[in-house]
Image (cartoon, helix red, strand yellow):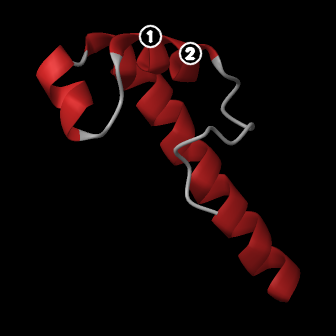
Amino acid sequence: MAGVAILRGWFRRWSARRTLSRDLPFMTDETLADVGLSRPEAVAEARRPFWQAGAHDAA
């Protein structure tokens, strides 16, 4: 059962990353500043595959 819980956790994290990467290009500079990203950082994060953790991901 622990393996299923781990897989669910990974899926939730990957899903959140995928959603964020789709939303980043449409965020205003003010919104990006609120989450601590510059426009170039947001572009780099949006281009990163969703399965790779970014610099701003919590460990």
Name the amino acid, label 1: Pro
- Taking the image as shown, residue 54 lies to the left or right of residue 37, namely right
The quarter in which the C terminus is drawn is bottom right
Q: Secondary structure at mark 1?
A: helix
Residue 30 figure quarter? top left
57 vs 21, nearest the viewer: 57
Circles 2 and 1, Cβ within 8 Å, touching? The answer is: yes
- The residue shown at (43%, 19%) is 42
25 vs 2, nearest the viewer: 25
- Taking the image as shown, residue 50 lies to the left or right of residue 34, namely right
Instruction: Tell me, for residue 13, which label it has, or none.
Output: none
55 vs 28, nearest the viewer: 55
Spot occupied by residue 38 in the image (x, y as percentages of width and height)? 34, 20
Circle 1 residue: 40
Q: Secondary structure at mark 2?
A: helix
Residue 19 figure quarter? top left
Circle 2 residue: 44
Dot 1 surroundings within 10 Å: few (below 14), some, or many (20 or more)? few
Spot occupied by residue 22 in the image (x, y as percentages of width and height)? 44, 21
- Taking the image as shown, residue 40 lies to the left or right of residue 53, namely left
Spot occupied by residue 11 in the image (x, y as percentages of width and height)? 66, 54
